[in-house]
Every structure is written in structure tokens, then in C-alpha cells.
Amino acid sequence: MFGLMMDEPLLISRQLAFAQRFHGAVEVVSRTVEGPIHRTSWGAVARRAAQLAHALTRLGVKPGDRVATIAWNTHRHLELYFAVSGMGAVLHTINPRLPPDQLVYVVSHAEDSVLFFDTTFTKLAQLAAARCPSVRAVVAMTDAAHLPADLPGALEYEGLLAPEQEAFAWPELDERTASSLCYTSGTSGFPKGVLYSHRSTVLHSYGIAMADALAISAADVTLPVVPMFHVNAWGIPYAAAMTGSKLVLPGPGMDGKSLLELIDDEGVTSLLGVPTVWANLLAHLKSVDRSLTTVRKVVIGGAACPTSMIRAFEEGHGARVVHAWGMTETSPLGTANVMLPKHQGIPYEATLAVKAKQGRPIFGVDLRLIGDDGLEKPHDGATSGHLQVRGPWVASAYFKQEPTDVGTHADGWFATGDIATIDPDGYMQITDRSKDVIKSGGEWVSSIDLENAAVGHPGVAQAAAIGLAHPKWGERPLLLVVRAPGADPSREEIGAWLETRLVKWWMPDAIEFVEALPIGATGKILKRTLREQFAEYRFTT
Ligand code: ADP
């Protein structure tokens, strides 16, 4: 027997319509590429998204067509999010940090028909327009006064919208219709496309908005520093529309000074981004001797958040840190770290050990650990295994690939490529990516723990641990350290610091200082490049 409830499809256009109707006056503030701060509202975003949908129809965009963006977090990018998906086309957000051949690859693979770009990225748009025959039109996301001269034929965003009507009959799509497309960074091989649906996006929005997840709410002023070209800015634009959160978008200003200005001026309460961005903000706050006054919550994910960073925000700035884990293939949110009643009243130092973990799954994401023997491992907080996930916002296949290529198992789980433990309370902790593990004497050394311990030292700005061949143990860790500006810690000093924080056999066999670490398109340290660079390195002891 079926229930007798309305079969309303879960559509992105409904989120926008809701924002227009019930949070129409709530502000959307952006730092623009042109310079000034731009102020609008959810109501105006909805009206301009309608104009944009008419303009795209005029440009010949049909349901299912891919429309690409190479852009910062701004109100125009937000309008594209809702207009393109809302009309039944697919928004392909491109990471501008991709190497040129990969950028050409993703545009060609996606068969993008129209490409929108911020003028910062005119060269990339030129490249795509010249090398990708599918691209019929390019649109500069600016007005006539700022149209770049070096891309003849580029249309201008504001001119495109101006003649159009401010209402659009958003189609009643099947909720499984594709809505957006994001490619993984391609650190191994070419990027792979993850194709989200309206259903997965709306369910993910509900999921992340929950109190024990990222807690997105009308009471918040939300600043997603995570780029809109990276996994739909973690789904924040959709969840903000649904909940009526004021949205503050940083444009190209991701440095500490620009972020602090925006946080102060707009009274931001909730920040979201990767650890490298927060390291810059914290360094800036220190240099100007300021603390955050309005921020209540900092969501940190995309890479492991060191305990020292959690402490810096919580003790130094009175903001609660929510450590979160996810991937492009999981929309991205999989787990979020919030405390349980049992943690109330325990000493802060003890809570830090819990907070450093990647958190508990949110409803909609199921987790399990599988050993090298193919068997499921216990959730005892000590046994590690290959992390697998499943749920309605987890990819079942990559775009234009057979389901088997995704690495899913016959029984419908997705293999994340991460190595993790899960404790009896459900807190998952990533110890490594499977391709980066350091296997010493048959046991895994957690490079993440090693790196976190190292960056806790005040003289260390960044650290990376890699496994190198060792005659006795198979592999042993080499720790590469970038010194903090103005600091000059010795190897012995860092070694002594680590000894009090790590189990003995996780201690690096050597520490080397480097000027910088190689960083990939999504801001993560490229361990493979490091392993190549240090392939000839030999431990002396
Ligand atoms: P890519 O795989 O293309 O680098 P993703 O953003 O999809 O980009 O990366 C997902 C991976 O990032 C995860 O599989 C995991 O290894 C890592 N990751 C994400 N969040 C965290 C976190 N909080 N702690 C540790 N690793 C994380």
C-alpha cells in the first residue's frame, strides 16, 4: 500500500522559490571581481536567476545541456547555480587551478555549451573557447564597462540579463534529473565527473542544515570561503536558500585581511572552508592583534584539521569548530564532529582528542570499514580499514563511465580511498588516504597524526609525512617541514616535541626542511609529487 502524501519532486528551483517567498529580504553580500561590495537579497537573486534562465533559453541552452563556470564566490555565480539547474540544464563548475590540459579535458569531456567566466580567468576562457568545439558562447560575468578586450565575441552578463523578464516558469522536472557536475581534482589520472541530481542536492541540503551537522540557519550570517567551484561550495548556497541564512560571498578576496574585513562589516557568525584558508586568517589575526567577535562556528574540512587550529579558534576566538569530512563523490558532507552529552564537563584537553576526529555520520550517509582481507572491521576506535560509504547523495558512477569504474562494490558501497577508524560512539577518524599510507612492519603509521603533531609546534608552518623504502621495516616516515615565518626550529627540537605526542614507532626516521610543499588544484598537498622528489632519499640510520 502506498502512502497518500503528495509526490512533490525535490527540486533546486523550489529552494529558490521558497527563498524568494519567505526570505526575500534576507541579504546576499558579495565582494566583487570589479572591486566594490555588492548587496542584494534572496528575492533579487531569484528575479535575476529567472532573467538568466530566459537569456540561456535565448542562447539555445536545452534541458540536459552543460553550462560551465570558471568563477569566484559571488552573487552572479549564485544566480547561475539556481538558473542553470532550475531550468533543467547542468551546471559544470570548473576549478581555475586545474592545469591547462586538464581544463581543456574537462570542458571537452563535459561537452560544455556555454561558458561563464570571471574576468580574472579570461585567459582560461580563451583557452577553452579556442580548444573546445562544444563551447558555442562565452559570457564574461561583468558589465559592459569591464568587458575584457582580449576575448573578442565574449558576451556580457549584465547586458544578457537586462532585457529579460523577472519570472520564469521553472519546469516540473523528475527529481532524479542531473543538476550539476563537478570533476575530482585528478591527482591520479584525468579528473572524473561527479554528476549530482536535484534529489541528491535537496536531500544533502536538509542533511547539512541539521543542528548536529553544519547547522545552517536563518539566525546565521554564513560565509562560505570554500569555493563555489569545489563540490558546490559544500552545498551551502542551496542550504542557505532553504533556511534563509544571510549569505556573504568573498569573491576573489580569500586572504586573511580581506576575510576579516568582510567578517567584521557583515557580522559573520558562521565560517566554512579548508584548513589552509584558516591558517592564513589566524596568522592575520595574530599579526594585527585582533580576535573574532561575531563568529560562533567555524566548519573546517577538505583536509585534516590540526588540533592546534581547533584550539586557536576555540580558546583564542571563542568560536566552536566543527571538523567535517567529505568528498566530491559524497556531495560532499559525510561526517561532522559535534559533541555528545557524555562529553559535557570533561576537561577541554580531553575533548580536543575527540574534536580532532572527522566526526559522526549524518543521517543519509552510512559508513563501514573493510580490511585488506575483504572483511568488515569493528568500530572500536583502534582497528583501521578502508572506509566505504553509501547513501542518496553518494555517487553511483562517474559521468560517462560504467558503474564499476567508480570503485563501488557489488553490494552498492562506494570505496572512498581513505583509511579510517570508527569508535564505538560513531566518530570516524581518517588516518590516511590509501594511496598515501606508510606501512611500517605491516602496520599503518598515520601520516595525518604525524603531520598534525608537527604543525602544533609554533615553529612549523606546514608538514607532510611520506613513506620511503626501508630495508627492515618496508617503509618508514620522512617528515618534511616548512618553517613558520621568522622561526628557525632545529630537527632535534621538533623531534623532542613529537616524542611527547606520538607513539614511538610513528616517529619519523628523518626530518628535512623544505621551502614549500607542492599543492594541488583543491589546495591539498601532493604526496605523490613529494614521493617522486624524495625517491632517491636514504635514511642514514
Ligand atoms: P580530491 O579527491 O579531488 O582531492 P575531494 O575534495 O573530493 O578532492 O577530496 C576528498 C578527500 O579529502 C577525502 O577522501 C579525504 O581524503 C580528504 N578529506 C576531506 N576532508 C577531510 C578531513 N576533515 N580530514 C582528513 N581528510 C579529509
Image: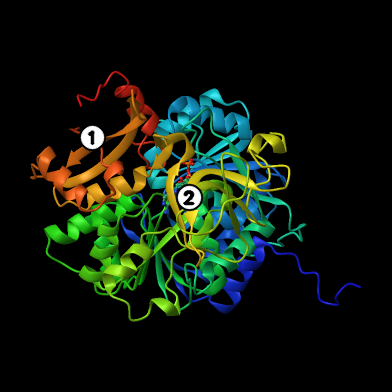
Q: Which residue is mark 1?
A: 516
Task: Name the residue at the right extreme.
Answer: 1
Looking at the rendering, which quadrant does residue 348 occupy?
Answer: bottom left
Q: Residue at x 44, y 65 (%)?
A: 337
Q: Residue at x 70, y 36 (%)?
A: 404
Mark 1 residue's CB less than 8 Å from ligand 1: no
Q: Which residue is mark 2?
A: 420
Looking at the rendering, which quadrant does residue 14 occupy?
Answer: bottom right
Q: Residue at x 47, y 51 (%)?
A: 228
The amino acid sitting under disc 2 is Ala
Residue 249 position in % (x across, y down): 39, 59
Residue 126 position in % (x across, y down): 46, 29
Question: Which image quarter is the N terminus in?
Answer: bottom right
Looking at the rendering, which quadrant does residue 513 occupy?
Answer: top left
The reply to whether the C-beta atoms of the residues labelled 1 and 2 are less than 8 Å apart is: no
Q: CA distance from mark 1 to mark 2?
A: 28 Å
Residue 124 can be seen, yes or no: yes
159 relative position to 316: left or right: right
